[in-house]
Image (cartoon, helix red, strand yellow):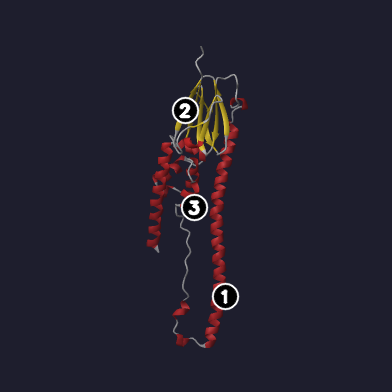
Amino acid sequence: MKENKIHFQQEQANKLEELGSYLRQCRTQQSLSLEEVTALTRIPARLLHAIEEGRLEDLPEPVYIQGFIKIFAEALGLNGAELASAFPTGITLEYKKNSWRRLPAAQLRPLHLYLIYIFVVICAVSGLSLLVRRSAVRVVTREDYLQQTANFVELSNLQQQLETVEPVFNNSPSQNKPVQVDVTLQERSWIRVVADGKTEFEDILPEGTQRTWVAEEKLIIRAGNAGGVLVEFNDNISKRMGAPGAVEELTFAANPRS
């Protein structure tokens, strides 16, 4: 039993190291720092760093680690549920054989067999009912935690956006400004917008979002999933920023005045 536990812990450590290395690679490809991911996920940077380094001893219970991996991956535009399910949590059930089967047949009389039969049936029904209830509680608890964790992070991000939101006119189109870029997201992506040297927006936008930014001289747009972002400059034909999953940056400048 002890050897099995040690083997399972080693399996968890190996899988965490593999997932952490992949998440770090995706994060660096998108030019995101741990502090930026912390701002997006509300997960402390020390825990994100421990996940990337595969340090199982610096992290909480496995079910919490699984939730962190899901949120971390979704912040990078990845399939969080699929990556989280690859990390084992160690919820297992054990069954024991009935010891009465080992008794010699000659020692069991008809009355004894009848009483043992009744006892075994009662124990089997009670045990099966208990195992079903425990299994249901474990599954519901795990799924509820993952859902509650995701809801908490989404609520925190929404609250942070409401607290730091810019006035409405900063994001509304203006016919008086020579640079206007319309952005449409066909897939979820991280977006950063710099207008005339000032960062106007930096966050993850969901699929289907349509936004417009304007500038006097120059507008820079950087996307973490360029294949899912369409841009339209000054009411011209919209175009895709780049390949799916690629980090791309485009600069839009005003036409020089004659």
Q: Position of residue 203 (x, y in %)?
A: 52, 34
* Residue type beneath disc 1: Ile
Q: How far separated are the C-alphas under marks 2 and 3? A: 40 Å
Residue at x-position 46% and y-position 87%: 107
Name the mark on residue 79.
Answer: none
Q: Which residue, as the protein is rendered here, is positioned at the far front?
A: 237
Residue 201 at least partly seen = no
Q: How far separated are the C-alphas under marks 3 and 1? A: 34 Å
Q: Name which of mark 2 and mark 1 comes first in the sequence.
A: 1
Q: Position of residue 245 (x, y in %)?
A: 45, 39
Q: Residues within 10 Å of mark 2 (few under 14, many from 20)?
A: few
Q: Residues within 10 Å of mark 1 (few under 14, many from 20)?
A: few
Q: Which residue, as the protein is rendered here, is positioned at the far top?
A: 258
| 29 on left or right of 217 | left
* Residue type beneath disc 3: Val
Q: Position of residue 217 (x, y in %)?
A: 51, 19
- Asked whether 158 or 194 is in front, the reply is 194
- Asked whether 81 or 132 is in front, the reply is 81
Give the quarter of the figure containing the N terminus.
Answer: bottom left
Q: Secondary structure at mark 1?
A: helix
* Quarter occupied by residue 175: top right
Name the residue beneath numbered marker 1.
Answer: 122
Q: Is residue 54 above or below residue 240?
A: below
The answer to whether the residue labelled 2 contacts the one labelled 1, judged by CB atoms less than 8 Å apart, is: no
Residue at x-position 54% and y-position 58%: 138
Name the residue beneath numbered marker 2.
Answer: 250
Q: Secondary structure at mark 2?
A: strand
Name the mark on residue 63.
Answer: 3
Residue at x-position 52% and y-position 84%: 113
